Amino acid sequence: MLYSRWLGVPVEIDEGKFSCTMEWGTRVRGRYEVVCPPALIAMRWDFEDDNVPVPGGELTAYLRIYPQDNGVRVEVHQFAGTTAQARFMEFAWSMVLGRFSAGIGAAANPGEPVTPRAPRPKRHS
């Protein structure tokens, strides 16, 4: 529920497997391989999309969380096969972590209304 509230789209999590469909239609899914609170999340994930470059298979990512005096610092270590894929992953993770940064306060408060993101067409660059 918390994940759905900050991401802005319904997220299903069942026995370490997660999946969601972003508001522009991209389906993201994966499995949490290692969760070591509060410092590490290791996952394998992929997505269905008509965008280029399509990763073409399962990806591995590590999220490391470092407490700071004024919050936390999150580092994402995402494996990518090409420079173009790395640029795409940088954009995707920036979007997801940006939503997290902007919405986690409201998402963590069950009494705070969180408006789901409206469906929209994919932006092509």
Image (spheres, helix red, strand yellow):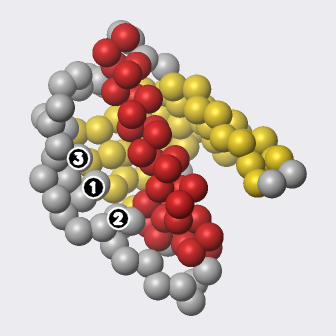
Query: In the visual, does 94 lie left or right of 46?
Result: right
* Distance (Cα) linking label 2 and label 3: 11 Å
Q: Which mark is residue 26?
A: 3
Q: Counting residues from the N terminus, which is met first, the one under dot 1 or under dot 2?
A: 2
* Quadrant of the frame with the C terminus: top left
Query: In the visual, does 101 lie left or right of 89?
Result: right
The residue that label 2 is drawn on is 9
Kind of residue sitting beneath label 1: Thr
Quarter of the rendering containing residue 7: bottom left
- Could one spot residue 34 in this view of the protein? no
Residue at left offset 58%, top offset 65%: 104
Q: Counting residues from the N terminus, which is met first, the one under dot 2 or under dot 3?
A: 2
Label 3: few (<14), some (14–19) or many (≥20) C-alpha neighbours in 10 Å: some
**Callout 3 secondary element:** loop
Q: Counting residues from the N terminus, which is met first, the one under dot 1 or under dot 3?
A: 1
Quarter of the rendering containing residue 85: top left
Label 2: few (<14), some (14–19) or many (≥20) C-alpha neighbours in 10 Å: some
Percent position of residue 73, x then y: 71, 42
Residue at left offset 37%, top offset 11%: 83
Kind of residue sitting beneath label 2: Val
Kind of residue sitting beneath label 3: Thr
Label 1: few (<14), some (14–19) or many (≥20) C-alpha neighbours in 10 Å: some
Residue at left offset 58%, top offset 26%: 77
* Distance (Cα) linking label 1 and label 2: 7 Å
The residue that label 1 is drawn on is 21
Which of 24 and 12 lies nearest the eye of the viewer? 24
Does the residue at mark 1 contact the one at mark 2 (Cβ under 8 Å)? yes
* Distance (Cα) linking label 1 and label 3: 6 Å
Does the residue at mark 1 contact the one at mark 3 (Cβ under 8 Å)? yes
**Callout 1 secondary element:** strand
* Residue at the far right in the pictured view: 69
Query: In the visual, does 73 lie left or right of 19?
Result: right
